[in-house]
Image (cartoon, rainbow, N blue to C red):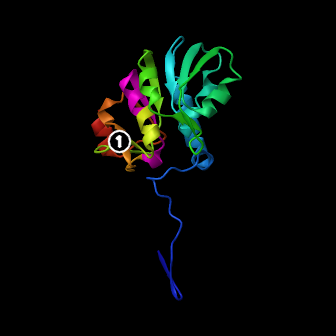
Amino acid sequence: IKKVYGGVTVTDIQDKRQVIPFEERHAKNELEKAAIAKKAASCVEENDLIYIDSGTTCTGMVEHLSGRKCTIITNSLQVLMKTLSYPELTVFSLPGKLKRETMSLAGNDVVNYLQTYNIHKAFMACTGITIKSGLTNATMEEHVVKKAMVENSHKIYVLADHTKFGVVSMLTYSPLSNIDSLITDQAPADEYSQFCR
């Protein structure tokens, strides 16, 4: 709050526990997110079955998969739209209810759906990362999808720019120890590097 003549006003502070609309998130740290997405795409091998999460950093992977034959499972409307230009990519959409603010499909049906696939690599987003709380996100519907994906994938890649470190959101979908690779734009604080080692 800010003291003003005759009272107080509330200043506009982004609460990391709430869902920020996709368009607003997409515009933040664009260069960093693009570099992370390019690096993540380089981890995809021919004929991989991968999951691409609905996070704004993850959606940037599609354009870097051009010319590579792989199968993508996603709940992201943005990923689905971007793959239209790449006929060599086989794409499956997760079932679920449309979440307009995240431009994704989410819901409890995902858990059963995912058990039928052997996903090689999952490329995941998060709202925040800490050693104690792990990988966190802000909505129950997305939490169900992310948790199911971590449980049904052989390798987990987390794509997160430097602003996600030290942030705790409402729900933990995975401890940090469950992931195989962390792709970011800056070297994280020593505590994270040591933990990962």
Which of the 4 image quadrants contains residue 191?
A: top left
Which of the 4 image quadrants contains residue 143?
A: top left
Whether residue 110 is visible to the viewer of this picture, yes or no, is yes
Q: Foreground: 13 or 182?
A: 13
- Per the image, is 147 magenta? yes
Quarter of the rendering occupied by the C terminus: top left
- Per the image, is 52 magenta? no
Q: Residue at x 31, y 36 (%)?
A: 175
Q: Is residue 79 left or right of residue 187?
A: right
Q: Position of residue 90 (x, y in %)?
A: 61, 15
Q: Residue at x 63, y 46 (%)?
A: 23
Task: Indicate the secondary structure of the residue bearing disc 1.
Answer: strand
Whether residue 43 is visible to the viewer of this picture, yes or no, is no
Q: Position of residue 187 (x, y in %)?
A: 41, 41
- Badge 1 crowding class, 10 Å Cα cut-off, few under 14, some 14 to 19, many 20 or more, is many
Looking at this view, name the residue that lies furthest to the right: 85
Q: Position of residue 107 (x, y in %)?
A: 48, 34
Q: Foreground: 95 or 155?
A: 95
Q: Which residue is mark 1?
A: 172
What amino acid does circle 1 point to?
Thr
Compared to 170, does 113 lie above or below? above
Q: Position of residue 41 (x, y in %)?
A: 54, 25
Q: Is residue 73 left or right of residue 23?
A: left
Q: Residue at x 45, y 53 (%)?
A: 16
Q: Foreground: 197 or 129?
A: 129
**Which span of residues is magenta-colored?**
146-164
Compared to 124, does 153 lie above or below? above
